[in-house]
Image (cartoon, rainbow, N blue to C red):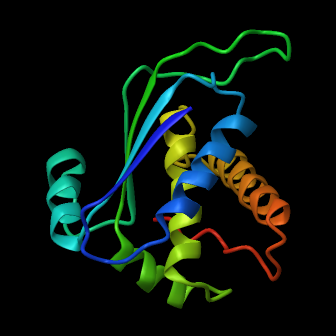
Amino acid sequence: MSIDVNNESGTEVDEQAILDIARYALARMRIHPLSELSVIVVDEDAMEQLHIQWMDLPGPTDVMSFPMDELRPPSKDDEEPPQGLLGDIVLCPEVATKQGAEAPTQHSMDEELQLLTVHGVLHLLGYDHEEPDEKAEMFGLQAAIVDGWRSERGLTGPSPAPTVS
């Protein structure tokens, strides 16, 4: 799995954790090990520009995903996953800091960025949360991935509650 993390935000973030949870999420979703992903960490101004340009919405947001090859998890256990370029996930640590502090289970910026990374991966794989049934599926899968990753690392305490907008 080729995953690049590029921090352009000026904020110190745990890039290794972002890389690790992205790799874990892609493996858990059975994405081909030679697929490629890019994660870019930007400041609020850059995120706001992207949010306006691509979503026609004001202000910065927490995470944006830009899919490339529209890869999907294999539908059968014995099916070979396709290889390709997943796309880009863009994260904003300033928004993540605010969301983590306002969440029902307050958590750190880095924990929120980990959650947002998984959220971005799921969007790249075609998951969405516009409809109630889609939201239940996506957020359930998101929680299972974050919980599994945290458990494997011996991290204790509650996992971050979904705060994704």
Q: Residue at x 33, y 65 (%)?
A: 61
Q: Residue at x 68, y 46 (%)?
A: 24
Compare residues 2 and 61 and report the one nearer the observer. 2
Query: Relative to residue 41, is residue 46 drawn left or right?
Result: left
Residue 111 in the image: x percent, y percent? 59, 74
Q: Is residue 30 above or below residue 60?
A: above
Residue 106 in the image: x percent, y percent? 62, 89
Residue 129 in the image: x percent, y percent? 56, 49
Residue 75 in the image: x percent, y percent? 75, 17
Query: Relative to residue 132, is residue 95 drawn left or right?
Result: left
Q: Is residue 165 above or below residue 32?
A: below
> In the rendered view of the protein, which quadrant contains the C terminus?
bottom left
- Name which quarter of the figure residue 94 lies in: bottom left
Compare residues 86 and 131 and report the one nearer the observer. 86
> In the rendered view of the protein, which quadrant contains the N terminus?
top right
Q: How many marks are shown on the rendered structure?
A: 0
Query: Relative to residue 16, is residue 27 drawn left or right?
Result: right
- Name which quarter of the figure residue 58 lies in: bottom left
- Name which quarter of the figure residue 23 lies in: top right
Q: Residue at x 52, y 90 (%)?
A: 101
Q: Residue furthest top?
A: 79
